[in-house]
Amino acid sequence: MPARLVLFTALLFAIPGNVMAQGVQTGFLDRTVDVAGQSFRYQVYVPSNYAQVERWPVILFLHGAGERGSDGLLPTAVGLGAAIRLDATRYPAIVVFPQVPRDSQWIGVPGEAAMSALDQTMNEFSTDPDRVYLTGLSMGGRGAWYLAYRHPERFAAVVPICGWVSADRSPAWRGAVVPAEDGEPFAALTRRLGKLPVWIFHGEVDAAVSVEESRKAAAALESAGADVRYTEFLGVNHNSWDPAFASPEFSAWLFAQRRKS
């Protein structure tokens, strides 16, 4: 091997990992994941000081019905992405923003794509598997219940915002959060998520998704002694995500959670 090449190789291995990481792009990055023969675009938010932290917490954010599509961009415009753009210091985490196609929801393959985007992100970046959080709003709040029910072992906390659990809310929302064979939905939810920290948010006068859905979920979890918090914003309609993500108490609570063994 030429001496010049040997010297370069030695220097390369002598460079500390955090210096190497300085070459990683930051901000909102475009990505793609392939699942079941379909290609799904998503975005990953990487903090500007990525190279200064050894292992980052990760948030999987599920958007609402209005952000469906295939551009990969809309999911960052409402909810957590908007909160990060207002003050990135409030959410020091790598955030995954998957997207479902039009006329789809976080059920079946799109839900699998969200989990695959999470896995791909954790393989690409330096992350902490014990600090992975799941949240979503409206249709994404339902999606948060759906994915948490199927993968409770993956998350340190779940935060459904103005979501719902019941299968009969509308025929348009095919598929169920809780499979019919598992019995009464809220009781099954409690059995499955009883050890997972949960914070539920909803607006008192939500005209799009009944607040009773979140009240029932919170009551069922609380009655079973689960680690659950429930915040109902008085006088607030469907947009309960902006006050939720603006809450310093919430962000402090979120990052304090660690996956239980």
Image: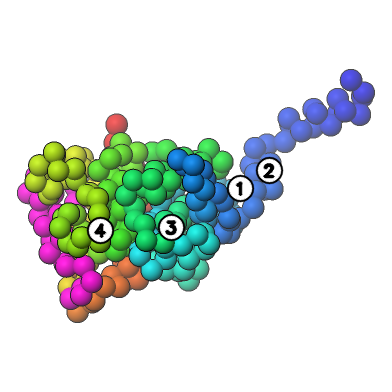
Mark 4 Cα within 10 Å, few/some/many (few <14, many 20+)? some
Q: Inspect the magenta stretch and tell me whether residue 191 lies in it.
A: no
Is residue 57 something that shows in the picture? no
Residue at the location (19% across, 79% down)?
A: 235
Disc 1 to disc 3, how far (Cα)? 33 Å
**CB-based contact (under 8 Å), mark 2 and mark 3:** no
Q: Residue 196 appears in which quarter of the rendering?
A: top left
**CB-based contact (under 8 Å), mark 1 and mark 2:** yes
Residue type (three-letter) at the residue carrying disc 1: Ala
**CB-based contact (under 8 Å), mark 4 and mark 1:** no
Disc 2 to disc 3, how far (Cα)? 38 Å
For the magenta stretch, what is the residue range? Answer: 205-228
- Left-right relation of 96 to 64: right
User: Foreground residue, 252 or 235?
Assistant: 235
Residue identifier under label 1: 51
Residue identifier under label 3: 101
Q: Inspect the magenta stretch and tell me whether residue 219 lies in it.
A: yes
Residue identifier under label 2: 19
Please tell me which of labels 4 and 3 falls first in the chain: 3
Question: Up-down: is 134 above or below 129?
Answer: below
Residue identifier under label 4: 173
Residue at the location (35% across, 71% down)?
A: 242
